């Protein structure tokens, strides 16, 4: 049985804003699946529909076989969420949070001790959560979500707002979840490196649609092994057209501002640079590099992810 | 599994939060105690009324204590939503109505504690009540139902306003304004005929009349509303009004909470 099945899922908010435009995807048990996209792409609305806090306009979604619309309690019983913003009672202790989750999910408190140790919370657990740092609080929220041993764990932008050191510590924690459980993870992020590091597969969302869905390797492979990147003064479109006419660029070349990026596929980088020189194209800078998921996103959406986020 | 266990869990959480917020316990007590212990004796002296008036006002302050306390409790629901763990509760595999019922349980418990305190302090101050066992039951039943209804109003408002500031701005209209019209400080027959007619439709008027009937055996307030000769029948009718108020506002509050939780 699939952990997550989403079919033609759509959400139109009051006022006619169509946040999610009929998306489809499936996630296998134990898989780490990333929803990648900038703010406004529809990621949080999708998570909201899967966690039953947003009512779908149409389409279906199932968690471990339970329809989130028709069997919301069962769907919630097999899932947990770590929210983007802190969702804690600051006056209560960390232990109280874990116990509360265990009771509401009818999970028993047996797992609490192990999770407290595993997530490095032993020194903090009996302190009010209001005294925790951002990273400590996020580790507590992850521990809380795991108390019920969910079959599906949603992590909504888990590292947003954390400083770089804590962010990397937390990424290690999340990576460690794969090794210690069969839990399926659905992770939303607008950090490309996070998605690449953690996810088995990635769906790139843009303007309410999934514009690409594959493994990070396959998404990168679509751009070949090397990219030519040049900054040109004046009309970038004209430069792109000239490169296409000479067979240096294909239809997958893309431009952002004055920077033109050309997937080279089988062509050698030095050969491409020489061809640009032969064209007499004035370039402020020119070079080659390996593609990243940022390039995948740019090619698919025409916007730079880090800027849009 | 019954709804009892998750409701108890949710109520326990709410109680722990309330216990760590002393303002929720003590602030609502200040004004009613001031009325019962300072203003009522002062009015008695200034207006040359008898001791029964102190008792009249002491019970009238219950009609202030319950709305103030429940409105403070409703504030906790907004704090939960804005900076608390409400979303974790919404993701839990329990019916969302139980979140409201858990909060209500604590609001009732805290109100009971405060009512007990108010009555005890009034007794210590020398104010006398003349309650029979049956009368105490009328008093407790009325206070319970009115608290449930007022908490429904508070939770409904909390679900419908986006911020604490807007909630607080509406509290006087809901918690205090009816108190001036409902016969808390004087019988409703002392009002103009138009206002008397309006007062008869306020659940608080029925509640106060019942509280006085229960705690003092005084059916005057009930008679001002119903004009009947049988006190028990009038009390039954007023209790029905308060019960309908409680049931209606609880249903509305659960619906408002569910709607606000689901975008």
Image (cartoon, coloured by chain):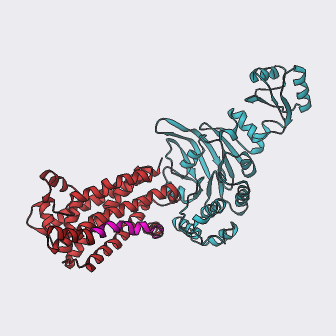
Give the quarter of the image for residue A226. Answer: top right
Residue B139 appearing in the image? yes
Give the quarter of the image for residue B205. Answer: bottom left
Examine the rendered structure and indicate whether residue B218 appears above or below residue B91: below
Please identify the residue farthest to the left as the structure is shown: B229
Colour chain B appears in: red
Residue B255 appearing in the image? no
State the residue at coordinates (68%, 34%).
Answer: A303
> Depth check: A184 or A18 in front?
A18
Q: Main secondary structure of the magenta part?
A: helix
Please identify the residue farthest to the front as the structure is shown: B46
> Depth check: B63 or A122 in front?
B63
The x, y position of residue A3, in whole percent, is 62, 53
* Chain assigned cyan: A
Examine the rendered structure and indicate whether residue B10 appears above or below residue B124: above
Q: Is residue B16 magenta?
A: yes
State the residue at coordinates (64%, 70%).
Answer: A124
Give the quarter of the image for residue A184. Answer: bottom right
The x, y position of residue A236, in whole percent, is 76, 24
Examine the rendered structure and indicate whether residue A231 appears above or below residue A11: above
User: On the picture, is A176 further left or further right than A110?
Assistant: right
User: On the picture, is B162 further left or further right than A114?
Assistant: left
> Depth check: A248 or A309 in front?
A309
The x, y position of residue A296, in whole percent, is 74, 37
The x, y position of residue A21, in whole percent, is 56, 37
Q: How many marks?
A: 0
Q: Is residue A45 magenta?
A: no
Examine the rendered structure and indicate whether residue B75 appears above or below residue A239: below
The residues colored magenta run B15-35
User: On the picture, is A161 further left or further right than B94?
Assistant: right
State the residue at coordinates (71%, 48%).
Answer: A195
């Amino acid at each position: 049985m699939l952990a997550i099945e989403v079919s033609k899922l759509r959400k139109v908010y009051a006022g006619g804003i169509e946040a999610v435009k009929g998306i489809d995807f499936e996630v296998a048990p134990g898989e780490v699946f990333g929803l990648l996209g900038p703010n406004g792409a529809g990621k949080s609305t999708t998570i909201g529909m899967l966690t039953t806090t947003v009512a779908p306009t149409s389409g279906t979604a199932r968690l471990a076989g339970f329809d989130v619309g028709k069997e919301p309690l069962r769907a919630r019983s097999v899932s947990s969420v770590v929210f983007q913003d802190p969702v804690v009672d600051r006056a209560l202790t960390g232990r109280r949070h874990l116990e509360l989750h265990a009771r509401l999910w009818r999970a028993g408190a047996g797992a609490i001790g192990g999770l407290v140790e595993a997530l490095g919370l032993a020194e903090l657990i009996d302190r009010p959560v209001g005294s925790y740092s951002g990273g400590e609080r996020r580790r507590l929220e992850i521990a809380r979500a795991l108390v019920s041993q969910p079959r599906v764990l949603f992590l909504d932008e888990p590292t947003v707002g954390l400083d770089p050191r804590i962010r990397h510590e937390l990424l290690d924690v999340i990576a460690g979840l794969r090794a210690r459980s069969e839990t399926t993870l659905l992770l939303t992020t607008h950090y490309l490196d996070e998605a690449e590091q953690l996810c088995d597969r990635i769906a790139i969302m843009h303007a309410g649609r999934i514009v690409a869905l594959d493994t990070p390797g396959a998404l990168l492979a679509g751009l070949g092994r090397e990219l030519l990147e040049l900054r040109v003064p004046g009309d970038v479109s004209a430069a792109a057209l000239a490169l296409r006419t000479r067979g240096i660029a294909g239809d997958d070349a893309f431009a952002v501002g004055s920077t033109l990026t050309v997937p080279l596929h089988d062509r050698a980088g030095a050969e491409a640079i020489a061809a640009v020189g032969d064209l007499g194209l004035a370039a402020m800078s020119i070079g080659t590099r390996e593609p990243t998921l940022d390039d995948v996103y740019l090619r698919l959406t025409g916007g730079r992810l880090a800027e849009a986020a | 599994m019954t709804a009892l266990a998750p409701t108890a869990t949710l109520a326990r959480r709410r109680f722990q939060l309330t216990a760590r917020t002393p303002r929720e316990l003590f602030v609502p007590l200040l004004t009613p105690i001031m009325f019962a212990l300072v203003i009522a004796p002062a009015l008695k002296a200034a207006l040359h009324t008898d001791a029964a008036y102190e008792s009249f006002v002491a019970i009238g302050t219950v009609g202030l204590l319950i709305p103030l306390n429940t409105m403070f409790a409703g504030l906790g629901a907004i704090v939960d939503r804005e900076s608390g763990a409400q979303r974790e509760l919404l993701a839990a595999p329990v019916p969302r109505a139980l979140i409201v019922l858990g909060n209500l349980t604590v609001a009732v418990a805290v109100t009971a504690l405060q009512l007990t305190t108010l009555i005890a302090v009034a007794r210590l101050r020398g104010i006398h009540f003349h309650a029979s066992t049956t009368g105490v039951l009328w008093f407790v039943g009325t206070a319970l139902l009115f608290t449930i209804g007022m908490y429904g109003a508070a939770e409904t408002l909390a679900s419908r306003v986006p911020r604490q500031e807007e909630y607080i701005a509406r509290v006087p209209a809901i918690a205090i304004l009816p108190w001036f019209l409902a016969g808390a400080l004087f019988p409703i027959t002392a009002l103009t005929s138009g206002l008397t007619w309006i007062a008869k439709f306020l659940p608080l008027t029925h509640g106060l009349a019942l509280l006085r009937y229960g705690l003092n055996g005084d059916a005057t307030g009930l008679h001002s509303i119903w004009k009947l000769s049988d006190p028990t029948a009038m009390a039954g009718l007023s209790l029905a009004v308060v019960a309908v108020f409680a049931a209606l506002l609880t249903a509305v509050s659960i619906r408002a909470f569910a709607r606000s939780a689901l975008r």
